[in-house]
Amino acid sequence: MRISTGPLTSPEIAYEIARATAVHDCPDIPYQSQKNFLALFDYPPPGVTYERYLGYVDDQPAGYLELSYPQLDNLANVDVDLLVLPAHRRHGLGRAFHDLAVERARANNRRHLIAATVDRHPDGAAFAEAMGAKAGLAEIRSRLDLTTLDGIRLAELRADAEKHAEGYHLRRWVGVAPDDIIDDLAYLEGRLNIDAPTGDINWEQENLDADRMRKGEEARERRGRRSYQSGAMTGDKMVAFTWLVSDVDEETHAWQNTTLVDPDHRGHRLGMLVKLDNLDHLRELKPQLKAIDTFNAAENAFMLNINRAMGFRAVDAWIEWQKDL
Ligand SMILES: CC(C)(COP(=O)(O)OP(=O)(O)OC[C@H]1O[C@@H](n2cnc3c(N)ncnc32)[C@H](O)[C@@H]1OP(=O)(O)O)[C@@H](O)C(=O)NCCC(=O)NCCS
């Protein structure tokens, strides 16, 4: 069997490999359209550069490797997306990609390779271990099933949160944040890697500012994806926020991303309040929504408790791996 790797020659083939692998790993998550996948090539998030490769078994395309290099912070890291089609596994292509990723990381002065695996199949974790990576953070993917939402329970949670959140008011927006809150938003989002558990993964604080937040949203929109946000304000300052993101051409599924409350304003149920408000926000704008998925560190009890109370249920377990060079 002949194993080889080379630069990406066909983004369409990369899409087919990424789609087939994702469907194998997480059959319950609708995979993005080819149009949106390809748009990442032209509209990356600000401050990230990519290298992309195809892998071959007997000259047949069988794997896809994407290396992402943060350029504005996290300068020692490279994020690795290393995929081999299920039918072509255990022939050594994963190992060939691993060797290439290590070589490219060294050439780019990166010391930490970071990648995630899911527990649904043994392949990912067994491979990561065999490559000498260390399990750095346990994560859980949870799902909120909107077809069985408990409306009475949600109304109770909201009433309770509002009682604790007297003096705060809510604000909603879609896409780029309004000018008067975008600095607050950059500050809050930038706290994520400090405030949320990151285990032994070398994730450093992101250098976020209004300009980067704005460009990030504009690029996201060009990738066919839109963010829906809700924030809690005291006076004219935003002190808590949350965001959901959903592909414009996907009516039934969304992702819950960051929820963050400024440390000075914790203890007022603002995390719960903005999440409940944003759920209503998205349901109004995407009435056919059926499911929202989210990732949390397994040790993030505060966030998991809020999610469980809302009705999120664990679906699968993930590990973030890190290999140090
Ligand atoms: C992980 C993945 C890339 C491996 O690709 P692959 O081409 O099958 O990997 P290789 O054949 O080069 O395997 C290298 C070594 O990993 C280990 N390994 C891989 N899969 C394994 C499995 N299912 N059980 C036990 N060991 C396994 C073995 O030690 C293997 O060496 P060996 O075959 O000589 O025993 C592939 O399973 C995949 O795409 N999984 C989904 C995405 C993913 O999890 N990517 C990894 C992110 S770190």
Image (tube, helix red, strand yellow):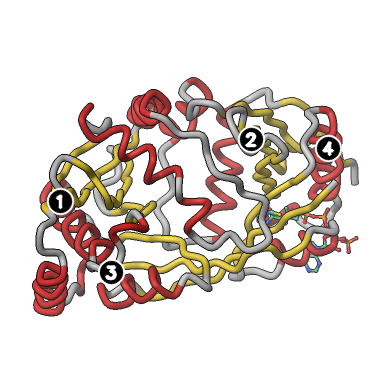
Where does the image place residue 160, in percent across and percent down from the top left?
A: 13, 75
Task: Report, in whole angstroms, how far the alpha carbon at label 3 lies from the one at label 4.
Answer: 48 Å
Using the image, tell me which numbered label, if any, was put on residue 68: 2
- N-terminal of the pair, mark 3 or mark 4, is 4
Picture residue at 47% right of the left edge, 61% below the top: 27
Task: Report, in whole angstroms, how far the alpha carbon at label 1 lies from the one at label 3.
Answer: 23 Å
Q: In the picture shown, does residue 56 fall above or below 256?
A: above
Numbered label tally:
4
Three-letter amino acid code of the residue under disc 3: Gly
Callout 1 secondary element = helix
Mark 3 = which residue? Answer: 267
Picture residue at 73% right of the left edge, 55% below the top: 322
Determine crowd level at label 2: few under 14, some 14-19, many 20+ residues with C-alpha closer than 10 A: some
- N-terminal of the pair, mark 4 or mark 2, is 2
Mark 1 = which residue? Answer: 281
Left/right of residue 204 with respect to residue 304 in the rendered view: right
Q: Of residues 305 and 133, which is closer to you in this image?
A: 305
Are the two marked residues, 3 and 2, in contact with CB atoms closer than 8 angstroms?
Answer: no
Three-letter amino acid code of the residue under disc 1: His
Are the two marked residues, 2 and 1, in contact with CB atoms closer than 8 angstroms?
Answer: no
- N-terminal of the pair, mark 3 or mark 2, is 2
Q: Of residues 320 and 263, which is closer to you in this image?
A: 263
